[in-house]
Image (cartoon, helix red, strand yellow):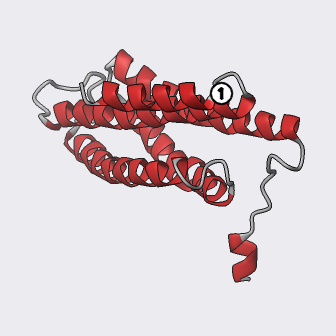
Amino acid sequence: MADEIIDDNFINIEDDYGEYVQFLRLLFTEYIELVEKIDKIIDENVFSGYTYMELTGLIRYASKRVFPLLLAFFGQDENFEDEIYPEFMEIQLMVLYLFDKLQYELDETVIKWNMNDAVIDEDIINLQSVNYLLKLIIAQLALFGNVFDIKIQNIEGTLSNDDYEKRLVEVHDDMFI
């Protein structure tokens, strides 16, 4: 049984280059859709019961589907295991921690929210912390999205190894500005 868990039999570059790149793009699309949905919630800046359910669903979807899938794939694929896998592990752990804090803040907000009112009162202090946590989460997710995209471009051959290394440094430098 342990062998089944370890060997997920993901497609690799030696199997079929075209299918491999298509699989990478599908993984990337799923990840980017998660980032875009969270970014949209931040842009709308409205809290409601629907927002609560949407964020709770996104948290669960990311932690139960997207992150484990990426983690398993990156850990087994030779193109990702040395440089991308460790970075994803760090970002995933930070985002999961922030997701836990966010879920706590969301639950606190709902508990304090008067369900009879259609609009949330401004005196609920932790809405600011919800927005703050969302912004921290989106920054981490966007960082890895950029790194993942650059790696895919390198694998596709649209970005040389030298340009890949240079762009990777630029992405990380931009994070700290």
| Badge 1 amino acid | Gln
* Image quarter of residue 89: bottom left
Q: Nearer the viewer, residue 119 or 137?
A: 137
Q: Residue, x 34% and y 50% (percent of image)? A: 94
**In this picture, residue 55 sits left or right of residue 177:** right
Q: Tag 1, which secondary structure?
A: helix
| Residue 100 pos. (x, y %) | 33, 53
Q: Quarter of the image containing the C terminus? A: top left
Q: Residue, x 42% and y 24% (percent of image)? A: 39
**In this picture, residue 11 sits left or right of residue 113:** right
Q: Residues within 10 Å of mark 1 (few under 14, many from 20)?
A: some
Q: Nearer the viewer, residue 81 or 54?
A: 81
**In this picture, residue 59 sits left or right of residue 119:** right
Residue matched to label 1: 153
Is residue 29 visible in the rendered image? The answer is no
| Residue 120 pos. (x, y %) | 23, 26
| Residue 26 pos. (x, y %) | 72, 35
| Residue 86 pos. (x, y %) | 47, 54
Is residue 86 visible in the rendered image? The answer is yes
* Image quarter of residue 121: top left
Indicate whether 26 appears above or below 101. Answer: above
Q: Nearer the viewer, residue 84 or 62?
A: 84
Q: Residue, x 56% and y 29% (percent of image)? A: 162
Indicate whether 143 appears above or below 14. Answer: above
